[in-house]
Image (spheres, grey):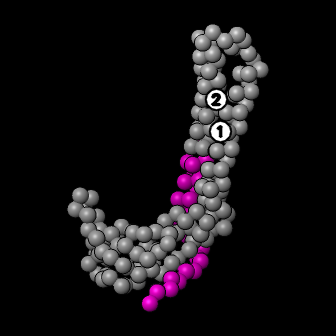
Amino acid sequence: MALELERYIEPLDAGELEFLEQKESKDRKLYYKIFQFLMFLSFIISYAVAWIRALGGRAHAFSPLRFFISVGVLLSLSLIATFIVYCFDLRRVQKDIAGKTKTVEINHVMRKAYFPAKSAYYFYIDSKIKLSIEVSYEDFTRMAEGDEVCIEYTTHSKEYLGYF
């Protein structure tokens, strides 16, 4: 018999909203720095290719037209890659901030595990969003396999917020 999972939407509390805003700000700055690095790398690669062509004895190795075309192609690829990552990551966090909602999902403990190397206790759950969660010792000893545990995550970006 398959267990049906129950989900419902709740508003984010102030601490969770602040966490998302800090994450969005940090990630936005990181994307900007990565794109700056890719821009710099586009010029360096184009310049290095021109030098390789010159060392190979090619005529017109330092052609400005060829240089700026290669820089343009590399910048375009960098821009497309950065935009795709933005769409799949940062924009979802921004949707969560604008919507101010989180999803609460009721799951079942499938297996319990203790990892001595980390001195950490885990529940393996039947969620499609999160396969395992780290829990406190009290919850680990109190709950058994098959018990219900609720996890909270942001609605769009699926950022794990906690359990209860």
Q: Position of residue 63 (x, y in %)?
A: 73, 15
| Depicted 47 relative to depicted 157: above or below | above
Residue at (57% x, 43% y) in the render: 30
Residue sitting at x 64%, y 29%: 42
Estimate how packed mark 1 is, as few (under 14), some (14 to 19) or many (20 or more) residues with alpha carbons within 10 Å.
Answer: many
Residue carrying label 2? 42
Q: Which mark is residue 103?
A: none
Residue 49: give x, y in percent of width and height: 62, 21
Q: Earlier in the sequence, mark 1 or mark 2?
A: 2
Mark 1 to mark 2 CA distance (whole Å): 8 Å
Could you say where residue 45 lies in the image, as x and y percent from the top left? 61, 25
Magenta extent: 1-29
Residue at the extreme bottom of the image, as rendered:
1
Q: Amino acid at mark 1?
A: Ser
Q: Check disc 2 and give the amino acid type.
A: Ser
Magenta stretch holds residue 39: no
Q: Quadrant of the N terminus?
A: bottom left
Give the residue displayed 59% in from the left and 77% down from the top.
9
List the residue tagged with mark 1.
78
Secondary structure under the numbered disc 2 in the rendered image: helix
